[in-house]
Image: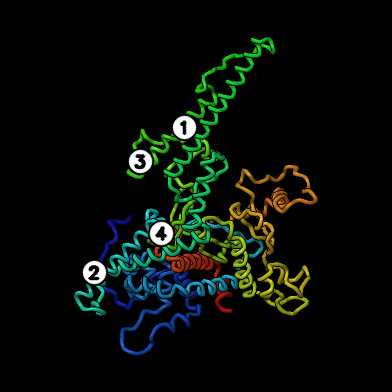
Amino acid sequence: MARGFRRVDRDQQFLLPVDMREWLPDDHVVWVLLEVVEHLDLAALEARYAQSGPGRRAYDPRMLLSLLIYAYSAGVRSSRQVERLCRTDVAMRVICGLQVPDHTVIARFRQRHQDFVRELFTQVLLICAKAGLGRLGAIAVDGTKITANAAKKATCRRQWLQQQVDEILTRAAEQDAAEDTAFGPGEHAEETPRQLQGRREREERIKRALAEVIAEETERGLDAEATAAKERAFLEATRAGRNDVGSRPVGADPVAIAEARLQAAQDRLAEEVEAKRNQIAVMRERIRRFEAGQGPKPNLGPFSFDENRGQQVARAKRWVARAERELTAARACKVGPPAEHEQADLSPVPGGGRHGPRGITKDDRPAVRRNVTDPDSRLMHDSNGGVIQGYNAQLAVSDDGLILSAQLVQDINDRRQLQPMSQAALTAALLVHQARCLGQCPKLDRCCLTSAACESGNRPRGCDDTGCPCLADWIGTLLFDAGYWTQDNLTVSGPDRLIAPGKNAARPQPGQDHGRPPQNADPATLMIHRLATEEGAALYKRRGATVEPVNGHLKDRTALRRFARRGLAACQAELTFAALVLNIGKFCRLTPARRSIALTT
């Protein structure tokens, strides 16, 4: 029987040198990762370092790359956290060979080589393809929103941006005048103060954001001249009492709109009073003819001979009263926010549009805004119904969960992304196919899939044999959810596709007798009937099991719920690197035999 506990002696010295290969088991993922990185072609990346001359030698790029890949796979993206783990985590100590790179070295390595990440992603994709990953029968495409490294409150309109730029120019003129006084005309201080460098970077971002806002407003017809014309037309239509005035122009003067609506309401009241006077005159004429024995007795009922009474006149008076309250509230908004009990009544008023007047401070159309922290990011709706400041990440995923393409866009929805993502999926599929194709086409004695197949997406010319092994390893169907449902996306050329017309409840259910589609059916009807078949429903059902788990792994395993860097190019590199990490993770989970085939060819 055992007595006591095992003795812990932390002062014991090793009698033999330490062997780091004994720290981790032979089947640990680190050894596979190091082997994969060793097979990558990093000649272009290594050429960026000076190999001779004075100075301290740089860290091995392969070591830093392996370190970042392993850190991302563990959900650690902070360079400071990576530096800390290089001292305490056994796997990271093995990767860096007991060296501890500073967090600034890690951050600068990630920033300096962001343009090389796409090349690394392609090399890893080819290695996975040689190992048999990347089944191309069904490719699912989906978009997910990722938060940017910027706050929503830093998103501003043109008026604020213009005001900030004017202040920047004023301060710059004052600073130039002060330097001319202190150092003489044409001279300046030798060194820029450190506290001014960050301010100048922010000023550059504000100027860039203003330029983008002005360009987009001009493109959308929201520039000053077009906006003024729309506002004049809106005021004239509102003043005329028309109900088809549409939405209120962005930035329109609420006081002018309220005055136009009051004028329309007063004109309507005058018309109703005049109509009441005519009714009274007609009724008096009928009574006179009855008393003279020239006509039947008129049915007076509840008729009133007071021109200020009546259902239509009373309603017109209520419209005038509400328009007056709206005008009072609009004028008060220029001085300060109205009190809670003085809010404008938003009941229908003549000339207020189809659904009556909108809120005084609410814009009916989204104004052009830019974020001064990250001007490339956009306000977007996420899957929870909220609004985030972020980007739209588009993923094309093969049938076995391999990421073929990862693109970062600024569109708030997915409608315009079907064609570019289809092209990206075709390009990646061609690379995957050529990496493992044996060139056994019976007609050409080589691979019959060339760049022409990538451009058309259909069966390439020169091979019409249905039993060709090259065509067996090619794209079957692209799967899209309801966010891509548009008429153009249904009819555009390219590979076969399935697009859902709506959410689960809105999609046609298989097993029901939907009948055959009409002979002259449009593409939408044909797509709905195809999804209602057993084959179409089973094929589309694979979309949720293909791309949705990848979205979850991207945000949970690599912790990419929020970008660490700013700018579209930097965030694109971060997304591509995270996709590379997930693909390497799938490769590491293969059997040693399949991995060795990919790494020895």
Which residue is denoted by mark 4 in the rendering?
371
Residue at x-position 34% and y-position 60% = 164
Q: Residues within 10 Å of mark 4 (few under 14, many from 20)?
A: many
Marker disc for residue 70 = none
Marker disc for residue 332 = 3
Q: Residue furthest bottom?
A: 53
Which residue is denoted by mark 1 in the rendering?
320
Q: Residue furthest right?
A: 519
Q: Amino acid at mark 4?
A: Asn
Q: CA distance from mark 4 to mark 3?
A: 30 Å
Which residue is denoted by mark 2 in the rendering?
11
**First in sequence: mark 2 or mark 3?**
2
Q: CA distance from mark 2 to mark 1?
A: 92 Å
Label 2 close to label 1 by CB (< 8 Å): no
**First in sequence: mark 2 or mark 1?**
2
In the shown orientation, is residue 524 left or right of residue 302? right
User: In terms of secondary structure, where does tag 4 sit?
Assistant: strand
User: In terms of secondary structure, where does tag 3 sit?
Assistant: helix
Q: CA distance from mark 2 to mark 3?
A: 79 Å
Of badges 1 and 3, nearer the viewer stands 1
In the shown orientation, is residue 339 left or right of residue 533? left
Q: Amino acid at mark 3?
A: Ala
* Residue 155: % across, % down: 40, 56
> Colour mode?
rainbow
Q: Residues within 10 Å of mark 1 (few under 14, many from 20)?
A: many
Of badges 2 and 3, nearer the viewer stands 3
Of badges 1 and 4, nearer the viewer stands 1
